[in-house]
Image: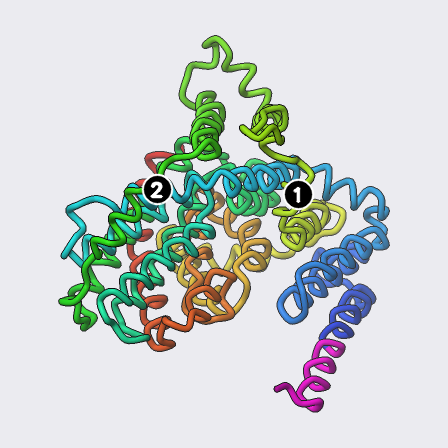
Amino acid sequence: MTTGAAATKVNVARYVNSAITVLLMIVIGQLPPFGQVSEVGMRILGVFIGMLYGWITVDILWPSLLGIVGLGLSGFFTVNSAMAGAWGNPNLLMTFSSAIFAAVFDACKVSDLIAAWCLSRKFIKGRAWVLAGMLALANGLIGIFANGIAGIFLLWTVILKIAKYCGLPKGDRFISFLLSIVVFTGISAGCSVPFRGGAIIFLGFANSGEAGAIVTPSYASFLLYMVFIYAVSFFLLIICTKLFIKMDVSRITMPDEIISELKQNKINFEQKVGVVVTALFFIMLFLPGILPADAPGVSWLSSLGLIGVSFLLLVGLSILQKPDGTPFIIVAECHKNIPWPVLWLFGATFPLADAMKAPETGIMATVNAGLVPLVSDMSLFTFMALCTLVLGVVTQFTHNMVLGAMFLPVLCPLAAQLGGNATVMFFLGYIILNCAYVTPAASMQAGFVHGHPDIATRDAYIFGILLLVLTYLVLMVIGIPLGNMVFK
């Protein structure tokens, strides 16, 4: 039971941090300019630092709203033009449309089909580490083709059934590993899809830096690169866990009851439609990046883009009826899936980035003047390795999206100035920032691992640290040279 004193303490902390957020926006804007920063630039800096403090200590939503108002009062924008800069940005609109369309994947239960197929293979029975690999693969596929979060809850149910059938106690280390790895793979696979919200948002952060810093990869190259890096990382995670972390897997087997239950699940009408729509969605988005530009229909598909494809398929599904005569989907209900706090954070960063890189504010000129001398004596590899390491460590204590908004617009152009590939720098930052599992505060996905009652706290930290270290090594050894070959 929460005491009145504890409740008062929590409320006071929130009020204090909220007040600090507002004061930072106001006070910093009134300080004397420095470097090449102008008076308008100081007001923009105040809005940025205030929003950043609010994002970290209080909330994502209202500091973003207040930030847009602050930008409108800075003298660089009006409130209306700041709002137009947020919601008129194509990256925000793509995130919006993909969030609506994600509801279709949930409704179709495509994730159930993928899980049933992967886990009903006969060669899994009696092979604990093969089972771990198939669970990872199952939620990886679910994360790419459906919804990784839905896959987490689905596969958690299966894993806990296995633990019960095998008579394993709560907190068993191998069960903790299985519960953790489906979180890792499901979230990572979702980040690998270039037309999902996470990828669009982080690409938007990177492209908000200096013009031309990022060569935006094709959908196909983005997906293949990400999947390959993650596949190597998770393969190594399973191997290293098997070799170096003591576990008793002698009692682990996929019970016949579960295999039989999975095989008995018949594909229904909604799932059939879901498979077809998922295939169409991917095909329509990937074809422009694969076929020659003059091939029939390619120009039309390119013009549609993510927003057009999503909306056309949503219209088709709205017209389609289920066997009982009801609409297959109701578009208004699909809006329930929209992550409004994330969208408002994303929206606030676009006009903010426009202001920060504008010559009349002098902010980016001052940042570059300070950073370039610090990194100019570094080799390109040292710069990339150090930046990736710092981001990987700091993201365990600060929200990864906030760090992306802060650093990707700066680090990618700096990599280009040092003669490197800014797109590769983006992928290093994007992947390591989404490897935020070590502490409960690292990210939403870390909360899944640290908050599950059947995952021992000690194991949550061990697996999170191991994944971070292995992913970092894979990026340094494979990610950089592969990225330089793929993203030219």
| Residue 427 rendering spot, x and y as whole percentages | 43, 46
For the residues labelled 2 and 1, the Cα–Cα distance comes to 29 Å
Front position in the image: 261 or 202: 261
Q: Which residue is mark 2?
A: 265
Up/down of 123 relative to 170, above or below: above
- Magenta stretch holds residue 6: yes
Which label sits on residue 77? Answer: none
User: Depth-wise, is mark 2 or mark 1 nearer the camera?
Assistant: 2
- Amino acid on which disc 2 is placed: Asn
Disc 2 to disc 1: CB gap under 8 Å: no
Q: Which residue is mark 1?
A: 335
- Residue at point 54%, 19% (across, down): 301
| Residue 456 rendering spot, x and y as whole percentages | 35, 75
Secondary element at tag 1: helix
| Helix, strand or loop for the magenta stretch, by majority | helix
In the shown orientation, is residue 79 left or right of residue 176?
Answer: right
- Amino acid on which disc 1 is placed: His
Q: Residues within 10 Å of mark 2 (few under 14, many from 20)?
A: few
Secondary element at tag 2: loop
- Residue at point 61%, 47% (across, down): 337
For residue 420, say whether it is visible: no
Q: Which residues are magenta?
A: 1-16
**On-image quarter of the C terminus:** top left
- Residue at point 72%, 63% (across, down): 34
| Residue 281 rendering spot, x and y as whole percentages | 49, 28
- Magenta stretch holds residue 417: no
